[in-house]
Image: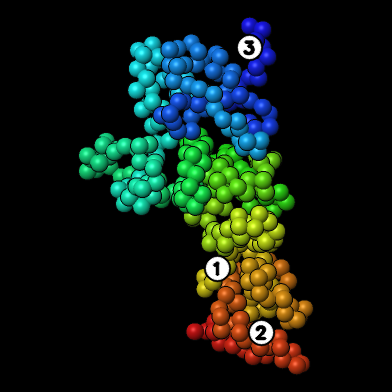
Amino acid sequence: MHFRSSIPDCKGVNGVKGRVGIKWYKVKFDEISGFVSCQACYEDHILTSSFAAHLESAPPQPADDTWACDMAISFIQKEYDDKGKLNDWASFVAETKNGLFGLILCAACYCDQVIHTGEEPKWEAARQYTQSYDTKVLCGMGIFSIGIAMARAHETKDFQAFWTAVHKLSREKFCDDDGIEDGVWYTLLSDPIGFAVCAGCYVAIAEALGVSRFFVRKQGVPPGTKWLCCFNLAHPRLKRYMPRLLEMYFTLDPTSFDRFVSVHASIPVCGRDENVKNRHWCGWFDCTICPECYAEFAHHSPLAAKMELKSTFPEDSTMCEMYSARMRTLYKECSEASPLDLGPLLTYSVQRRMV
């Protein structure tokens, strides 16, 4: 009892940084890849069963890595107790793998991503799906965060990092295209307005790419809040975030990504040729410019000082004129004229609306 009292209590599924100094145990021979038990749960639960012989001390946890105890998951603890009474280790391994990961690949992605990597023994045929003709299954590689983690594993030849990412991801809410309600969110150190990454994408993208140091847990999110993760494929800005995220990954410098997000995350995406309501507008009554096109293009010109509309909120629906390459070229020509001449821009804009 005296020895147990000196061991830190389990930190649960939220995990703990390596710098805390928790001692960990893993399953021998990687039978359950990524499975770890903290020392407290090892003493309280693992040692109560003959299954303890299948575990061994895990390598030291890196100081900045977050590990979470799998024995804190009620499903796994129950499976451990039930299968331990039957001395059925094989069933515990199978059930725990299914409960932790639930990761399924289609045959094509298995061939592309797994074969010739040395990871083949960790996979098995999902016969309950291959023998079914009326079941739809999402291939794991269709999940953006898993695709990123797998690509990183191929690049570094470190597939243990992939399993760690999948293991952590399995505990988080799914990054749904419709958004996540009451999720755990992360943001950049500057906490830009409108930017949030779900916990699943944080562990499978930010941590997998080694850039988690540039993110922090987002504070003050009211209960019931539902957001769309900024790393979700359905997010309208993802295509523009990704090049800057990769730049941060290659350079380990968040400046460019942070600067872009700080400007664009809080403004709506340009509606292009659609009339939209409830937005602020810049430009002129005959040539309206949405906040996005103003921020990334129009405000750099001397014409910006002559605009009639400056973050004006009209009652009627309005269409942006400046998404068009032709309009941007004309805007640039008018701004370079001496003296400045708005005439051609406004005339063409009026004619364009009549088409």
Confirm whether residue 177 shows in the render. no
For marks 3 and 2, give the CA distance: 73 Å
Please tell me whether residue 306 is drawn above or below residue 10 in the rendered image.
below
For marks 1 and 2, give the CA distance: 21 Å
| Residue 349 coordinates in the image, percent (x, y) | 59, 84
Considering only order in the chain, which callout, 1 or 3, is on the residue closer to the N terminus?
Answer: 3
Q: Decide: marks 1, 2 in contact (CB < 8 A)?
A: no
The quadrant of the rendering that contains the N terminus is top right
Tell me the SS state at disc 3.
Answer: helix
| Label 3, residues with CA under 10 Å away: few <14, some 14-19, many ≥20 | few
Confirm whether residue 128 shows in the render. yes
| Label 2, residues with CA under 10 Å away: few <14, some 14-19, many ≥20 | some
Residue 91 is drawn in which quadrant?
top left
Please tell me whether residue 262 is drawn above or below residue 163 in the rendered image.
below
Amino acid of disc 1: Gly
Q: Decide: marks 3, 2 in contact (CB < 8 A)?
A: no
In the image, farthest residue toward the bottom: 338
Tag 2 residue? 332
Considering only order in the chain, which callout, 2 or 3, is on the residue closer to the N terminus?
Answer: 3
Tag 1 residue? 271
Tag 3 residue? 4
Amino acid of disc 2: Lys
In the image, farthest residue toward the top: 1
Residue 345 is drawn in which quadrant?
bottom right
| Label 1, residues with CA under 10 Å away: few <14, some 14-19, many ≥20 | some
Decide if residue 302 is on the left or right side of residue 316: right
Number of the front mark, 3 or 2: 3
